Amino acid sequence: MPGNRLGVVLFQLGGPETLEAIEPFLFNLFCDPDIIDFPFAKIGRKPLAKLISTTRAKKVQHHYAVIGGGSPIRKFTEQQAIALRRELATRGVDAVCVVAMRYWHPFTDEAIELLRDAGCDQIVLLPLYPQYSSTTTGSSVNEWKRRFPAVAGRSLTAVPQAIVTDFYRNEQYLEALVEKVNEALVRFGPANDQRPQTNDSPPTLIFSAHSVPVSVIEAGDPYQRQIEETVELVCAMGGWKNPRRLCYQSKVGASKWLQPSLRTMLRELGAAGTKQVCVVPVSFVSDHVETLGEIDHEGREIASGAGIERFEMSAGLNDSPAFIRALAGMVMESAGIPAPALAAQAASSMSQFAGTD
């Protein structure tokens, strides 16, 4: 039987909240052994991370500048944690929901301390990455395993744990994503019914996912396959007839990463005469620099320069009620807590059975 108090850890990559924090944030990222790994990495990883972070910080600073000077991902993730706790409470679950960022505050240590002080009887690890990758979910969970025994203390180390490994197939998650895409398509006018527009074509749906090195995929990482399946599932549920494309973004360094890039895709569509596009961030659940900066700012500028006349981006799921309900269902399932309706039905059945004894 599950315990009385449930601890839920919402994992995210995190982001710098000020322009000054960009470089140390990137340093932490490129020090990650799940991101940078090569022979003798223990010796060379930190100097390489320092070099990359210094160079990269100058390149991405404008992305953060145009979205207000820092990443809003902590704000959105903490809002998700608050909304999830409230949703679980409505289902009769006493939960403590904490945030563990991989590369910036609040770090994993901070989340573990909060759980220790809350006296949890069971823990569910909830990485907020719909698709599994060793570079995201894998990295966050590895950090948890490294930090947990030292920080948790004797009172927490024996507490049972469960994990939501991925959720790209979860129907409620897909419904929440469809809802956001439909909200964006409405902004094109009567495009949702697929009738010809003033430019004789409905908007092209561009699904954009965070890229990863091809070497990661070749090593057996399921991320690319799961991204492709997510696009198929959400389009089937949405029932859209729009042309669609899949691309990747946020490449770093000279190695080969998943292609085509968002920049390339926009330029190719513009050259082919496409006039309307709707970009759907398909691997992200919160708005942050990669959606607000790379897509909605830089992508919009590239699209305009390529001759695309109408550019829209579907908003992040953030704390949408549909998405929070999806998370609550996944947490309860992982914790072995029956849904309220099922619990009531089971109790009724037991009562009837007892009455015949």
Image (cartoon, grey):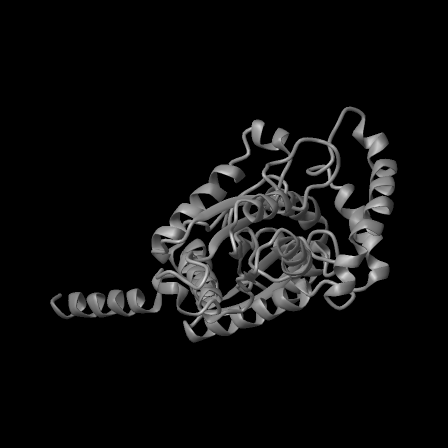
Q: Residue 345: image x %, image y %?
A: 24, 67
Q: Is residue 329 visible?
A: no
Relative placement, left or right, of 58 versus 333 is: right
Q: Residue 80: image x %, image y %?
A: 57, 67
Q: Residue 25: image x %, image y %?
A: 79, 53
Q: Is residue 84 visible?
A: yes
Relative placement, left or right, of 8 versus 13 is: left
Task: Pick the residue in front: 204 or 178.
Answer: 204
Seen from this angle, which residue lies furthest left? 356
* Vertical relation: 205 (above or below) 79: above
Residue at 16%, 65% in the rendered image? 353
Task: Pick the residue in front: 43 or 145.
Answer: 43
Relative placement, left or right, of 314 versus 254 is: left
Q: Residue 277: image x %, image y %?
A: 52, 56
Q: How many marks?
A: 0
Residue at 81%, 25% in the rendered image? 40
* Vertical relation: 31 (above or below) 108: above
Residue at 66%, 62% in the rendered image? 73
* Vertical relation: 216 (above or below) 32: above
Task: Pick the residue in front: 341 or 236.
Answer: 236
Relative placement, left or right, of 329 versus 151 is: left
Q: Quarter holding the N terminus?
A: bottom left
Q: Quarter holding the C terminus?
A: bottom left
Task: Pick the residue in front: 143 or 225.
Answer: 225
